[in-house]
């Protein structure tokens, strides 16, 4: 047996068998063998989910050896990629083809299959999450069959599998709608929180990508606006020295040091938070899109994130700001706020509604349960939907009320996997027991 643990240390497992397939046929063979012997199997990516969604007690399929771009349709800008490919590797390979994804989150360590299965998203009021860029999926079902689905071919399976929680099948290939490579102009600067909240709707509408980080106990938010650079304009990236200082020294080494001090001496967290908020610096630059979207995260944390209706954002943030000072234990990490357009994917957190995403974090090793529980109560009152890869306590009964197509999804998952080959305790909790 080999012990597995996720990035944040919030989930671990000791699977009896770890399979490392190198082809779709080998993945199908593994699934068939597991099913015949009455066992369960979960696919592994990079372990960047904070939930136990990837925990495998019996068998695990490690997809990290099944990587790379498998096919390119230059005319349509569509790329088919093997499911174990990390977003970092995908971005590099797309670069070489003169292509890019329209929108990305700020972490690129996840595998493409893990990212789409848990609903990874970026920010942009007119843009959807990563799964909205999928045009076709190939996956292995519980009986070992390899199937392909798209909007025109098995559309119900496609609606379920694009954010499938690993419960529908093991993804082998993902075909993505890309576009010609582009550059983004980035503006990052501290602004008074009250000013950011007052202008939030305008800022979200005026910018291609808009988000902000609120530092509890401070008066400022770090605001990020990313907009497409006009075609033909030469990008002006940060110098290597400035990039290293801003992102590695300040956002990782210095911030990590402040967090460790706060963990050791909790009474210092509030003044350190005020200091961090006041010490934020401004920068403007432009660069290849994925280099702007992605930020290296070297400081470990735990996280809970919910999508709420866009119109509920101010109410939620007002209550969250009132909650933080009442907590027994202080909060060392900022709150992140992003936006996304409505989509039609059954288990997407933005299904059917324009959404605001609110993510709360705590430095690893510091108390977080009271904070996360209070946050979950606040977002629950407005029908918040938890990110499938972030920490939450909801079960099938609660989730059914928040997802109009919940029962449609469960029906497809049970049709594709009637014996629960792809289930684990997390899937059992969020989807309910098998009939």
Image (cartoon, rainbow, N blue to C red):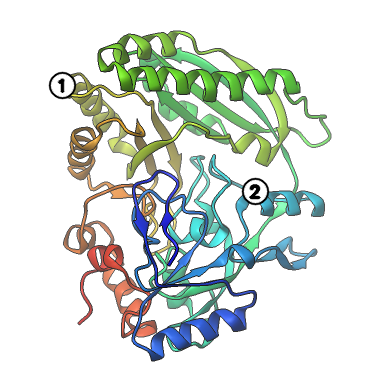
In front of the other: 17 or 33: 17
Q: CA distance from mark 1 to mark 2?
A: 40 Å
Disc 2, SS: helix
Please tell me whether residue 332 is drawn above or below residue 28 in the rendered image: above
Mark 2 residue crowding within 10 angstroms, few (<14) / some (14–19) / many (20+): some
Residue 316 seen in this snapshot: yes
Pointer 1: what residue? 326
Q: Position of residue 263 (x, y in %)?
A: 32, 23
Residue 219 seen in this snapshot: no
Judge left or right: residue 64 versus residue 425: right
Q: Position of residue 283 (x, y in %)?
A: 63, 17
The quarter of the picture where the N terminus appears is bottom left
Sooner in the amino-acid sequence: mark 1 or mark 2 = 2
Q: Which mark is residue 217?
A: none
In front of the other: 326 or 339: 326
Assess whether mark 2 and mark 1 are in contact (beta carbons under 8 angstroms): no
In front of the other: 11 or 310: 11
Residue drawn 51% across the image and 40% down it:
124
Pointer 2: what residue? 88
Which quadrant holds residue 161?
bottom left
Disc 1, SS: helix
Which quadrant holds residue 164?
bottom left
Residue positioned most to the bottom: 36
Residue drawn 23% across the image and 79% down it:
434
Please tell me whether residue 41 is drawn above or below residue 288 in the rendered image: below
Judge left or right: residue 373 versus residue 200: left
Q: Position of residue 390 (x, y in %)?
A: 36, 48
Q: Position of residue 379 (x, y in %)?
A: 23, 40
Please tell me whether residue 318 is drawn above or below residue 392 in the rendered image: above
Tell me how many marks there are: 2
The quarter of the picture where the C terminus appears is bottom left
Mark 1 residue crowding within 10 angstroms, few (<14) / some (14–19) / many (20+): few
């Amino acid at each position: 047996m080999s012990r597995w643990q996720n990035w944040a240390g919030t989930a671990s497992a000791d699977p009896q068998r770890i399979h490392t397939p190198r082809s779709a046929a080998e993945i199908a063979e593994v699934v068939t063998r597991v099913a015949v012997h009455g066992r369960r199997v979960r696919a592994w990516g990079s372990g960047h989910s904070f939930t136990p969604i990837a925990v495998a007690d019996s068998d695990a399929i490690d997809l990290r050896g099944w990587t790379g771009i498998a096919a390119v349709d230059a005319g349509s800008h569509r790329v088919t990629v093997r499911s174990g490919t990390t977003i970092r590797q995908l971005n590099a390979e797309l670069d070489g083809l003169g292509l890019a994804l329209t929108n990305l989150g700020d972490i690129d360590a996840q595998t493409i299959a893990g990212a789409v299965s848990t609903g990874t998203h970026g920010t942009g009021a007119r843009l959807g999450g990563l799964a909205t860029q999928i045009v076709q999926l190939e996956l292995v079902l519980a009986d070992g069959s390899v199937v392909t689905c798209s909007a025109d071919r098995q559309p119900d399976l496609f609606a379920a599998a694009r954010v499938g929680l690993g419960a529908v099948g093991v993804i082998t290939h993902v075909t993505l709608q890309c576009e010609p490579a582009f550059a983004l102009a980035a503006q990052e600067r501290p602004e008074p929180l009250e000013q950011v909240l007052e202008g939030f709707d305008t800022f979200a509408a005026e910018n291609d990508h808009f988000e902000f980080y609120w530092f509890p106990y401070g008066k400022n938010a770090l605001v990020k606006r990313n907009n497409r650079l006009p075609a033909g304009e030469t990008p002006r990236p940060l110098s290597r020295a400035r990039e290293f200082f801003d992102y590695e020294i300040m956002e990782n080494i210095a911030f990590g040091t402040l967090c460790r001090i706060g963990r050791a001496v909790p009474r210092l967290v509030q003044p350190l938070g005020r200091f961090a908020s006041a010490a934020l610096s401004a920068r403007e630059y432009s660069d290849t899109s994925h280099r702007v979207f992605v930020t290296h995260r070297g400081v470990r944390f735990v996280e809970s994130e919910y999508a709420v209706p866009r119109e509920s954002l101010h109410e939620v943030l007002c209550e969250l700001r009132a909650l933080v000072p009442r907590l027994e234990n202080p909060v060392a990490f900022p709150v992140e706020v992003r936006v996304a357009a409505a989509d039609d994917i059954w288990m997407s957190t933005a299904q059917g509604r324009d959404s605001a995403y609110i993510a709360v974090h705590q430095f690893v090793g510091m108390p977080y349960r009271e904070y996360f529980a209070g946050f979950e109560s606040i977002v629950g009152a407005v029908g918040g939907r938890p990110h499938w890869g972030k920490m939450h306590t909801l079960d099938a009964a609660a989730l059914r009320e928040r997802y109009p197509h919940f029962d449609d999804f469960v029906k497809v998952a049970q049709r594709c996997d009637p014996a629960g080959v792809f289930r684990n305790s997390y899937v059992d909790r969020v989807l309910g027991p098998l009939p």
